């Protein structure tokens, strides 16, 4: 069964940089869009709230695969400009998960006790300073656990780039199937699962470290150390 293990691992490793690049790019775009749309939904302007809500509900309520096809196949036909597969994947991952992240940001900001707002007003801080210096530092700590799960979900969604031949790990594994006997399918998919699991654990370790650092900065007791395997499993639930 393991006669071709070296070839399988080598081939899937060739897709690892694309998977990592799509994940990192998607996470970066997710953070930007999540904070932008999440704070916009708390705006006093009805127009801004409406625009941000349209974005959030639009991307949460439609298929991620269809979004990918729209950006990679339909958009170039409309504007006459071909999009690189990896870039198209990052856009879809960022816009889709940014919509979910916006609700995380909105909920975390609203969870900050009202007394904190009142104290900031008593200190004569303006709205921007209140948000930047008082509210967000506390809200960000509350955002980290759900963002951990969201980023793991984003990592797993990079497999969708297989549909546009971006060259990530799933596609590299699928390219092996015609050249290897059916008995090797277990090895191919087992190696893929292992790589995704290791990347998910890495994300969890980083997010746990940020969570502990944020808690210490606010003078809170750092959350108890939990096994990263349990967290990764929760992210896939």
Image: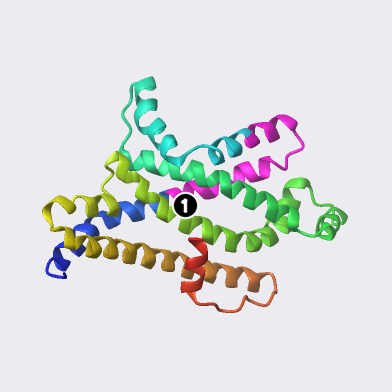
Q: Which of the pair 227/125 is nearer the observer?
A: 227
Q: Residue at x 17, y 62 (%)?
A: 183
**Does residue 58 belong to the magenta stretch?**
no
Q: Looking at the image, is 54 positioned above or below residue 203?
A: above
Q: Position of residue 105 (x, y in %)?
A: 64, 51
Classify 194 as above or below 175.
below
Q: What residue range appears in magenta? A: 26-53
| Residue 132 visible to an observer of this rendering | no
Q: Measuring 35% from the left and 22% from the top, which residue is drawn there?
A: 77
Horizontally, is 189 left or right of 144 in the view? left
From the top left corner, tell me how far across and down residue 20 is, in percent. Answer: 35, 56
Is residue 146 in sight in this rendering?
A: yes
Q: How many marks?
A: 1
Is residue 131 shown left or right of residue 186? right
Q: Which residue carries the number 1 mark?
A: 27
Identify which residue is drawn at 85% across, 60% down.
115
Image quadrant where one finds the N terminus: bottom left
Q: Is residue 28 magenta?
A: yes
Task: Choose top left, top right, bottom left or bottom right for residue 9.
Answer: bottom left
Which x, y percent locates residue 136?
Answer: 68, 56
Helix, strand or loop for disc 1: helix
What secondary structure do most residues of the magenta stretch adopt?
helix
């Amino acid at each position: 069964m393991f006669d071709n293990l070296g070839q399988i691992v080598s081939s899937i490793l060739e897709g690892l940089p694309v998977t990592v690049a799509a994940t990192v790019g998607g996470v970066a775009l997710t953070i930007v869009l999540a904070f932008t749309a999440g704070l916009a939904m708390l705006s006093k302007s009805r127009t801004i709230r409406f625009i941000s809500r349209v974005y959030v509900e639009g991307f949460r309520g439609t298929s991620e695969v269809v979004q990918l096809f729209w950006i990679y196949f339909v958009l170039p036909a409309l504007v006459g400009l071909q999009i690189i597969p990896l870039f198209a994947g990052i856009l879809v991952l960022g816009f889709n998960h940014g919509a979910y992240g916006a609700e995380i940001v909105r909920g975390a900001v609203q969870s900050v006790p009202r007394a904190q707002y009142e104290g900031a007003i008593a200190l004569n801080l303006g709205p921007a300073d209140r948000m930047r210096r008082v509210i967000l530092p506390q809200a960000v700590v509350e955002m980290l656990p759900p963002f951990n799960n969201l980023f793991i979900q984003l990592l797993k969604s990079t497999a969708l780039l297989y549909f546009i031949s971006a060259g990530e790990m799933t596609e590299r594994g699928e390219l092996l199937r015609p050249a290897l006997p059916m008995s090797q399918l277990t090895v191919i998919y087992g190696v893929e699962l292992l790589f995704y699991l290791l990347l998910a654990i890495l994300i969890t370790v980083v997010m746990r470290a940020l969570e502990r650092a944020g808690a210490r900065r606010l003078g809170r007791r750092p959350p108890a150390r939990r096994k990263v395997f349990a967290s990764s499993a929760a992210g896939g639930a």
